[in-house]
Amino acid sequence: MKKLNNILEQSRGLLLQISLIIALLIMLGIFNYESKNIEDVSNNYIQIKLTIDTLISGKQKVKKPNPNILIAKITEQAKFKGGKKALVKYFKENLKYPKEALKKDIQGRVYVKFKISEYGKIKNVKIIRSIYPTIDNEAKRLIKEMPDWIPAKSMDAPIKSEQILPVIFMKIKNKETYY
């Protein structure tokens, strides 16, 4: 065993040189290798993908996609009944500028995210860009109390969707407003 270790130790430099030459030849072979037809490459890709899929599906921890879940392409966005003008009118008539925010002259835009069910109902109202707590609460209340929307559609069927709206709090000549 000692003799073998001594021989390997003495020939370490030679073995390193041989391995570098082999690596260089492999690299030269790769660069000089003739390219295959696209069909050959795609078949190899499919075989590799199938092999990987087979290996992965053999594990128990891998979740397989649920075939009952359909990812729908929205063909028509959800709309406020009456359009944008009606939405602005709703905000102007129903917005209550918080007195504390008026006194402190706090103004700005609150972004509110919410979901619209396939029936047009407003759900899961969340503030995604905040200004001030009382203003945020008012924006949230305003969205929650909105009348039902016309739901988004996919191939003429109503579907759930998500919406983000800015609620703008601005004083104009001592009047609170939304625009």
Image: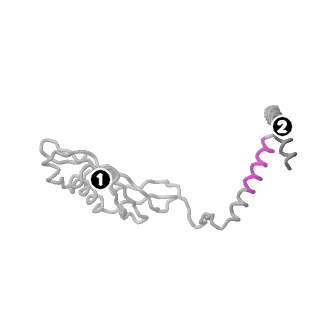
Image check: 41 left or right of 105? Answer: right
Identify the main secondary structure in magenta.
helix
Which quadrant holds residue 29?
top right
Residue 84 seen in this snapshot? no
Task: Identify which residue is drawn at 21% across, 57% down.
Answer: 94
SS for tag 2? helix
* Pointer 2 residue: 10
Disc marking residue 123: none
Count numbered badges in the picture: 2
- Amino acid beneath label 2: Gln
Residue 105 seen in this snapshot? yes
Q: Nearer the viewer, residue 56 or 83?
A: 56
| Residue 54, image x, y percentages | 73, 61
Q: Is residue 151 above or below residue 84?
A: below
Task: Identify which residue is drawn at 29% across, 60% down.
Answer: 146
Disc marking residue 87: 1
Which quadrant holds residue 79?
bottom left
Which span of residues is magenta-colored? 38-51
Task: Identify which residue is drawn at 13% across, 41% down.
Answer: 173
SS for tag 1? helix
Image check: 67 left or right of 14? Answer: left
Give the mark nearer the N terminus: 1 vs 2: 2
